[in-house]
Amino acid sequence: MKGLADYHTHTPLCGHAVGSPDDFIRAAVRAGLSEIGFSDHAPLPAGLREGITMRPEQVEDYLSLVEAARGRHGDAITVKTAMEVDFPFHESFDRRYLTDVRIDYLIGSCHFIDGWGFDNPEHLDEFDQRDIDAVYDDYFAILSSLIAAGVFNIVGHFDLVKKFGHHARADHSATVRRIAVECAERNIAVEINTSGLRKPAGEMYPSGSILSILFDAGVPLTLGSDAHNPDEVAYEFSLAAEAARRAGYRSISGFSRRKRYDIPL
Ligand SMILES: [Zn+2]
Ligand SMILES: [Zn+2]
């Protein structure tokens, strides 16, 4: 995928990814990408983070790890430093990093609805206890406040609630349109995250219909594989590029020190 950028990748520091940043970068070069961004999971609180995110005292190690890898491969490819941060914020996340100049962009992601880790297969049963449209409403309300927080550059996996194949019954497109306008007003991008293709949902985040709404509202777009091992870097990016073009996009976005710029698609 010549010239594209994979902006959602992880490192073993989170406890559920394998492969060194060097391996990820080599895979990105092989795939013909012009950029790779590391966006490992920012610390969740003890009790929630085991095997899911790095610990607070590892954040500096993480930033150094990416910096060192950039030093070794900077001639071959552009390497960006980022983090995937849970919203609503947890006290375990040091808000200093929201404005840290070493960080090129922040992905804001919602993995919890009122403490329920809805994308964790261990808590799947909870879907049977809840009305699916109420789950979508709750999830989109969190996305809306994530955008209003004004500190994120990219919204992660926009319709993650569908991960295990739980599709909404009602039509939530009016809500999505409102959120799209909020993103566009703040110049916040949404990613096409191809990892949904590897999950029971069997489709990218977001769906094609949401992508069209985002394009119509003028929301910038990034691409992310959510790679947790080097083989997943640029995963199905040809499908992602195709979906983006079908929705109307002719460029994607990159970020350097929180400043957005265009990358031709
Ligand atoms: Zn992960
Ligand atoms: Zn995520």
Image (tube, helix red, strand yellow):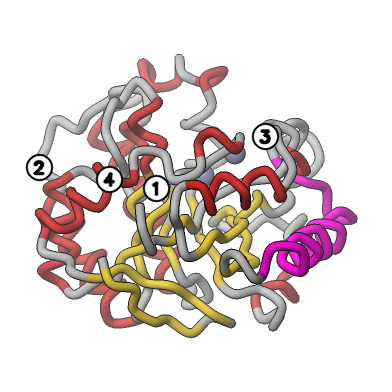
Q: Please, what is the three-letter code of the amino acid marked with disc 3?
A: Ala
Is residue 160 left or right of 101 when viewed as pictured?
Answer: left
Q: Quadrant of residue 50?
A: top right
Disc 4 from disc 1: Cα separation: 18 Å
Q: Give the mark toward the camera: 4 or 3.
A: 4
Amino acid type, callout 1: His
Kindly identify which residue carries mark 1: 157
**First of labels 4, 3 by sequence position:** 3
In what quadrant of the picture does the C terminus appear?
A: bottom left
What label does residue 238 carry, if any?
Answer: 4
Which residue occupies 56% across, 44% down? Answer: 27
Start and end of the magenta stretch? 53-74
Q: Is residue 175 left or right of residue 65?
A: left
> Separation of disc 2 and disc 4 at Cα?
29 Å
- Rounded to the nearest angstrom, the CA distance separating label 2 from label 3 is 35 Å
Question: Foreground mark, 1 or 2?
Answer: 1
Dot 3: element: loop
**Mark 2–mark 3 CB contact (< 8 Å):** no
Residue beneath label 3, please?
Answer: 17
What's under tag 2, amino acid-wise? Asp
Nearer the N terminus, badge 2 or badge 3?
3
Q: Is residue 166 magenta?
A: no
The mark lying in front, picked from 2 and 3, is: 3
Q: Is residue 250 visible?
A: yes
Q: Which mark is residue 131?
A: none
CB of mark 1 near ligand 2 (< 8 Å): yes
Residues at circles 2 and 4 in contact by the CB criterion of under 8 Å: no
Q: Position of residue 95 (x, y in %)?
A: 71, 71
Q: Earlier in the sequence, mark 2 or mark 4?
A: 2
Place of residue 71 in the rendered image (x, y in percent of width and height, measured from the top left)? 77, 69
Residue, disc 2: 171
